[in-house]
Image (cartoon, rainbow, N blue to C red):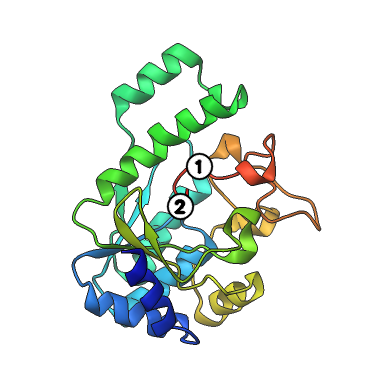
Amino acid sequence: MKEIAEELNKKFLGKNAEEVLEYFLNEYEGRIALSSSLSIEDQVLTDMICRIKPGSRIFTLDTGRLFPETYSLIDKTNMRYGIKIEVFFPDCNSIQKMVNENGINLFYESMEKRKQCCYIRKIEPLKRAFRGLKVWICGLRREQSVTRQDMQVVEWDEGNGLLKLNPLIDWSEQEVWDYIKNNSVPYNKLHENNYPSIGCQPCTRQVQEGEDIRSGRWWWESPEHKECGLHRR
């Protein structure tokens, strides 16, 4: 399947995001979905998908620790596009066991405990959401992080047995914001208060001018470890 990903990257070399999405949404109809974190990138992809092929599947993960503004954005997005974003939740028994054994904010204590929390709240629900899929669409961009600089438009996700599609991989942050403004795409209002990357509330903080856009995520860890495991390669 890695060979298929390589061939697809050659096929779409120089193509824009809409062209890439149109091909995959038609070719893999019923077996493709956008996994949205409600980021500005995922909001752009939601807008494109709803224009190109209305009714395509879009889902998100509710970890139980999101910002109120993120929950509001889910409602705003549903209303804006006349859709219902599927919401997947973590297993309540696993959450209860983890918190009772390690505390409510265990993730501050060690990377192992932080990854345990991410697995239970994000990875396990994501695997359930993947059932029946051949392709998952992501809003990753190379500019976002040192961990993403060698990613391609199409990748083979060995761990999940899926093709991963990154239509915005070459976009700059300015290009994302230009699209949002030009197309009246709803976005998280926290972005206006120096939150460029938004995840769970206790693991996200404001960043200062000039800092890396993901420096506010898991800020107590080194940059090369700042992934929850969703995009492990």
Look at the image and tell me in which quarter the N terminus lies: bottom left
Q: Which numbered disc covers residue 228?
A: 1
Which three-letter amino acid code belongs to the residue tagged 2?
Ser
* Location of mark 2 (residue): 72
**Residue 198's x, y, as percent?**
57, 50
User: Picture quarter containing residue 188?
Assistant: bottom right
- Of the two numbered discs 2 and 1 on the same chain, state the one appearing first in sequence: 2
**Under tag 1, what secondary structure?**
loop
Residue 53, placed above or below residue 232: below
**Residue 133's x, y, as percent?**
23, 59
Pointer 2 with pointer 1, Cβ within 8 A? no
Q: Whole-Å distance between the Cαs marked 2 and 1?
A: 23 Å
Which of the pair 90/7 is nearer the observer? 7
User: Picture quarter containing residue 155?
Assistant: bottom left
Give the residue displayed 73% in from the left and 55% down from the top: 212
Give the residue displayed 46% in from the left and 66% down from the top: 43
